[in-house]
Amino acid sequence: MGVVFWKELADHFSSRRFMILLALIILIGLWSTYASGQAIRQDTENSPAQYVFLLLLTSGTGTVFSLATFLGFFGPLVGITLGFDSISGEYANGTLSRVLSQPIYRDSLINGKFFAGLATVAILWGSILLLVIGLGITLLGFPPNSEELWRMLIFTTVGVFYVGFWLALAMLFSLLFQKTVTAALASMAIWLFMTLFVVIVSQGIANLVVPNPTTPEQLARQADIENIVSRISPSTLFSESVSILLNPAARVFGFALQSQAEGILPTPLALDQSLNLIWPHITTLFALVLVCFGISYIIFMRAEIRA
């Protein structure tokens, strides 16, 4: 598996389409971080002194979107790019039977491909985080505190799980269709549906269950139904996790009644309390990665491969 891992890792970082996508994400991410940092410097009086570095990831001031929003929307493209031709490309080139004729087991081949893609995602996400920290220190003049570093590190872990799901899904489609174009189109279709159209579907279902809400309780119930339905999308799980993790003052997902906020002090949550809120989201993302890769593993181990 080590031979396959290092070979696939080298192929990923020498691929032209991956390098173009990598350059695009890093350039836009740095531009977003620089614009947010300049806005924070100009508005130092209204910026909280304790979690300034987290604002570099979540603040959209001076830009159309924040860095966390940008990574949540375009991050799946990295996973799809790494996985849609991982197996179907071997089928198309006729190299799969040649590779397996060597002393390489099937499970070593698919495990090496998947872990190489996951390592590439981790290196990409970690590099973006290091660039944000370095640029933030240059713009703001001081380093992040320990809690900010831990929240950023957990944000990186959640991001790797999130993009890892799309990597595993693209590998699954690569096995099912055995054609690179079909696998890429199917992965893109699922990505667009989960990112854009799930919101519309969840709003429609919530309006059907609670039509024309007039009281605050009905509005809260409609919002709860909308949130529950939208959580079938990994994009929603990631965005809600980020909203709690990178905003220590956040305590609830979505709409909250005024009666629910009475008696609560507007103090930031500790890191363990924020983790308690998003732990179901993190475990669900991790489970989705395991399920998609597990199905791919079973299909590949039982597939008939001919020269």
Image (cartoon, grey):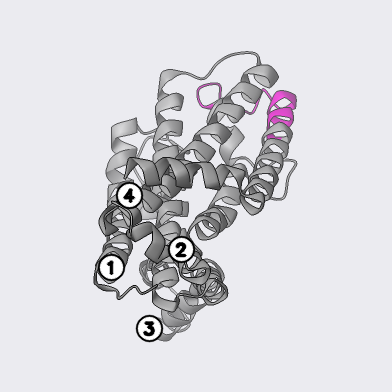
Q: Mark 4 points at which residue?
A: 282
Q: Mark 3 points at which residue?
A: 209
Q: Residue at x 42, y 19 (%)?
A: 146
Q: Is residue 257 visible?
A: no
**Contact check, label 2 and label 3, Cβ < 8 Å:** no
Q: Where, quadrant-wise, is the N terminus in this rendering?
A: top left
Q: Residue at x 44, y 69 (%)?
A: 174
Q: Which of 34 and 55 is in front in this view?
A: 34
Name which of mark 1 and mark 4 comes first in the sequence.
4
Q: Which of 149 and 286 is in front in this view?
A: 286
Q: In this view, does 116 lie to the left or right of 125?
A: left
Q: Mark 2 points at which residue?
A: 95
Q: Is residue 47 magenta?
A: yes
Tell me where the magenta segment starts and ends, as one range.
36-51
Asked which secondary structure carries label 2, the reply is loop
Q: Mark 1 points at which residue?
A: 295
Q: Nearer the viewer, residue 238 or 111?
A: 111
Crowding at label 4, few (<14), some or many (≥20) Cα neighbours within 10 Å?
Answer: many
Q: In this view, does 126 lie to the left or right of 273?
A: right
What's the amino acid at mark 1?
Ile
What's the amino acid at mark 3?
Val
Give the quadrant of residue 188. bottom right
List x then y, in percent, for residue 173.
43, 71
- Give the Cα distance between marks 3 and 1: 34 Å
Crowding at label 3, few (<14), some or many (≥20) Cα neighbours within 10 Å?
Answer: few
Name which of mark 2 and mark 4 comes first in the sequence.
2
Residue furthest out toward the top:
142
- Give the Cα distance between marks 3 and 4: 28 Å
- Give the Cα distance between marks 1 and 4: 20 Å
Crowding at label 1, few (<14), some or many (≥20) Cα neighbours within 10 Å?
Answer: some
